Image (tube, grey):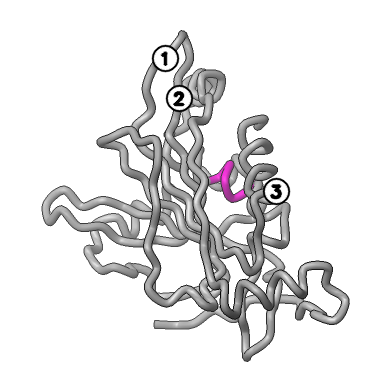
Amino acid sequence: MTKITPEYTVVDLSRWARKEHFEVFQGFAQSTFNQTVQLDITVLLKHIKEVGWKFYPAIISLISHVVNRHPEFRMAMKDNELVIWNEVHPSYTLFHKETETFSSLWSHFDGNIHHFQNVYAEDVSRYGDNLAYWPKEESRENIFFISDIPWVSFSSFNVNVANMRNFFAPMFTFGKYYNQDEKVLLPFAVQVHHSVCDGFHVARMINELQEL
């Protein structure tokens, strides 16, 4: 497997406003946290149908767009230094009905939501039948994770990571959307590491996603 080396900026901890918070949540108070909301996708669904997009890549591209706006969602440890990737790309689950397993496939996101629909389609066409966990020949460090659970709605969701000390990539999970009070709602969970991200940042991300 070929490894792609991404560009990044090293964080100067001595000048970083969250230096103390980072040290606390890297030390005795290691923790991740999760926030689950019900996104109103009524207008989005209508738009997707009008332009002929598929729901899954549309949601992936919107999440990717917002994630790349903010450094707290692009952080990682690299050679024992805290870094901010110049850009990050989505690694998303693809379910295989025949084996009841899934693959984690990443696609390049260049910032163009429209272009991503084609990139996604090409990747799924090429790798969709590959049952490997990582079906692509190339691997990336600068990825974040998206999971789809389209069979059930939920009001809370949590991913338990055994070794979370330096696992800073955000994880997004959404479920089966449903109708309520003339709206279409999508269960949407965000999980982040508290070393690099606070409730304010998650709330801002969710609000920006809702506004798209």
The region drawn magenta spans 61-65
Check disc 2 and report its element: helix, strand or loop: strand
Percent x, y for residue 84?
Answer: 70, 71
Q: Between marks 2 and 1, how big is the CA–CA gap?
A: 7 Å
Q: Nearer the viewer, mark 3 or mark 1?
A: 3
Name the residue at 59% across, 50% down: 64
- The residue furthest top is 182
Q: Quadrant of residue 159?
A: bottom left
Q: Are marks 3 and 2 in contact (CB under 8 Å)?
A: no
- 62 in the magenta segment: yes
Mark 3 or mark 1, earlier in chain: 1
Q: Amino acid at mark 3?
A: Phe
- 86 in the magenta segment: no
Which numbered tag is attached to residue 12? none
Mark 2 or mark 1, earlier in chain: 1
129 vs 94, nearest the viewer: 94
Residue behind mark 1: 180
Which numbered tag is attached to residue 200? 3
